[in-house]
Amino acid sequence: MASDRRIGVLARHLGVEMDFESHTATAISASPTSGFQGNSVFSHVVRAPEDPILGVTVAYNKDPSPVKLNLGVGAYRTDEGKPLVLNVVRKAEQQLVNDRSRVKEYLPITGLADFNKLSAKLIFGADSPAIQENRVTTVQCLSGTGSLRVGAEFLARHYHQRTIYIPQPTWGNHPKVFTLAGLSVKTYRYYDPATRGLNFQGLLEDLGSAPSGAIVLLHACAHNPTGVDPTPQQWENIRQLIRSKGLLPFFDSAYQGFASGSLDSDAQPVRMFVADGGELLVAQSYAKNMGLYGERVGALSIVCRNADVAGRVESQLKLVIRPMYSNPPIHGASIVAVILKDRNLYNEWTIELKAMADRIISMRRQLFDALRARGTPGDWSHIIKQIGMFTFTGLNSEQVAFMTKEYHIYMTSDGRISMAGLSSKTVPHLADAIHAAVTRAA
Amino acid sequence: MAFTTAMARRLIGRKSVIGARSMSSWWRNVEPAPKDPILGVTEAFLADPSPDKVNVGVGAYRDDNGKPVVLECVREAERRIAGKLNMEYLPMGGSVKMVEETLKLAYGENSEFIKDKRIAAVQSLSGTGACRLFADFQKRFSPDSQIYIPVPTWANHHNIWRDAQVPQRTYHYYHPESRGLNFAALMDDIKNAPNGSFILLHACAHNPTGVDPSEEEWREISHLFKVKNHFAFFDMAYQGFASGDPERDAKSIRIFLEDGHHIGIAQSYAKNMGLYGQRVGCLSVLCENEKQAVAVKSQLQQLARPMYSNPPVHGAFIVSTILGDPDLKKLWLKEVKVMADRIISMRASLRENLEKLGSPLSWKHITKQIGMFCYSGMTPEQVDRLTKEYHIYMTRNGRISMAGITTGNVGYLANAIHEVTKSA
């Protein structure tokens, strides 16, 4: 039936086309790729592999086992294993809903102005000289990912060096973000599997041999996936090296407040770099520390030498954003602005944030104790030494696969587990799984 | 080890020995970027202190008091959502429910393509995000292709495909003399484009001209596309806004679907649901079969992941709440019609006013054109005069956003237009 209709259309068209033929050299041919055969111009497209991190949740959701445990994506869970919406967020939401004067108009390309100012204060400190001197441009972006991408696109267009050095290992999405933005990606040594700590010598060597002006990605705190952070003294050494070589720091700050429980402490590495008067970029995310994951709230700040440069930089950031999504989503940023603006809500937030960080620290302790109690071979002290949402267990991909198959534990194949996904109830199950994986085979 | 503030202060105190390397900026060569021609208009309007100022620049709906509108169905949806839902990450492809409902609007409530799962679709950052994702996808999987863009078009279309690094060409569309469609030249350009070209079409309510092909003209365009084996990409930002009836506004798309084209569509809820700042939309690509749709969707997700990971949840929840509830959906359809009707009545009123003033020019096109915008035919110099002398803000291409016109300002606007054009 459908083919009859198509033949009819073709016939009618050939009739019409007779006129065109006399004017142009365009011949009509039902080419092999003609729509008449129903071929798509995209028939060669193959199915992409699952995202290594988000794919874990996909697999977890498919599993019918009642004891399954999702330790994949870094989303906080309560001790009951439930997602958490912070009280301050609910309060802020209610405020927004009740305010009938609120409208849903487009934000400016750079986003909600209040949100931007408050975000800059949050990461740089309210008394930051860079802010006071108007040297900072801040634009609202789609969470950490969006902030990284916009910053990287800006660098690819306007910065003289197109190489970015990322730590080995790093968040799985980093390489793709930078590559698609037009940067070329190199790595610097970071994690030392032998000590399960920082390979400080390797880091210094690799950054030391980077070409002058190269961009360096730094995790502001709570390194993802390892949980291994430099000490304050090490940060100072890193800063000196970066500044003396004229490298450009690009901070990814996705866990401010989550690492130690203190927003200010977790921001110190960034503030150190600002204090020396130099330039830098920082991508902030509110996904974890305000539990706003799906609202996609974040900010990109670029600290410049002076206000004039900051103004010009901001204008160019707009040109990156406009053809990407025009302007950022309003809801999440409005929630953040309400909270950061209000003394009481802000204080409440810091308390709820500390509670989340503390619960994670206690999960670390419980897991460590559980493994010790089982006499699991190996040194597991890195579980309590590492910081933030994740633990880099040191388990290899075979062991991980075993744990998924036999114990329904879902985690990324690099051995990273999200401590936020653990509860007092599920620690024993995880400890059993790790014990079994380690004792059965290497 | 946690970083204490005291420790940091001690370290920073010692830092001055090795400070930052040089005193100049990495960005000293960064040029100030030109202002966005559309969004820059609103910035200028906001800065103007005149009590008579009128903003007919950006395409955001206003009621007859010139106020932005939040639809009742949206307020109700928000009331239902607030306090109930968590804010977990959506999948990379966004809200499945929202996407399903959105496809029904474009492809038809009972579309066989939806039933057969032949549509690869992802939630996108409104219309802009949908176009950009498609442009990136086109670059990756049809790397030798170009995009044909109508003249004129929404200015950001050029930016989007440029940033996706897809070469652009243009095709004739607007006919300045008649202020209508240059159908013959359009068909000529479509015919002369190499077989298998990618062509951008505005599904309805063309932005900025308001000039749409007739149904018969759409059918002829579709036939020519078939002969040339072109790929049709529809930007549908105004479904419901053009005629007041979403089904009617999707006619062009339905014609192409009937004719067997494998199309792509960018849909937006910015205007028709008033969700502007929420950034809710959908990109869809009709494929040969379910397997291909799965493959294409997975690749679209691969492009979204390094851009923003996953789309924002709030606006998507509003849309799926409304479209998933028959009563709310009915309310929405009613409210869309109210908006479209007000615009249609403002068109009539503006034209009437101009004719009453004895304008020597023809203003028929004001009521012939459709949707949010009217391509007035005014020159940039005339527009500048409108702004300078009458505090009327619009883009310099002479595009008037009808949504910014009210019974309160239509007289003032007509008078001003008359003054700057009467000697033309």
Image (cartoon, rainbow, N blue to C red):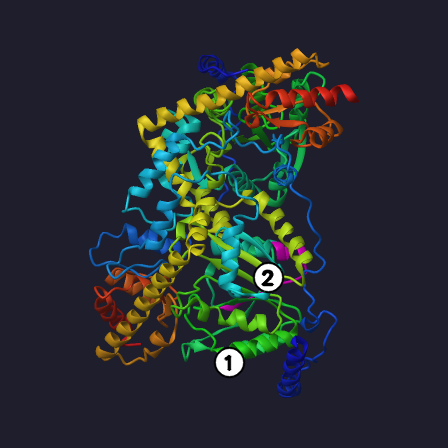
The residue segment tinted magenta is B137-151
- Residue B226: in magenta span: no
**Parent chain of label 1:** B
Instruction: Identify whether A181 is placed above or below B372.
Output: above
- SS type, badge 1: helix
Rendering coords of residue A98 (x, y %): 29, 42
User: Crowding at label 2, few (<14), some or many (≥20) Cα neighbours within 10 Å?
Assistant: few
> Looking at this view, is A310 or B184 the one in front?
B184
Residue A18 visible in the picture: yes
**Three-letter residue code for mark 1:** Glu
Instruction: Identify whether B90 is placed above or below B154.
Output: above
Rendering coords of residue B392 (x, y %): 28, 61
Q: Is residue A415 left or right of residue A141?
A: right
The image quarter in which residue A168 lies: top right
Q: CA distance from mark 2 to mark 1?
A: 28 Å
* Residue under numbered circle 1: B216
The image quarter in which residue B180 lies: bottom left
**Mark 2 or 1 closer to N-term?**
2
- Residue B139: in magenta span: yes
User: Crowding at label 1, few (<14), some or many (≥20) Cα neighbours within 10 Å?
Assistant: few
Q: Which residue appears farthest toward the front when viewing the image? A: A66
Residue A247 visible in the picture: no
**Residue at image location 68% in from the left, 20% down from the top:** A432
**Three-letter residue code for mark 2:** Lys
**Residue at image location 41% in from the left, 70% down from the top:** B210
> Looking at this view, is A168 or B172 the one in front?
A168
* Residue under numbered circle 2: B115
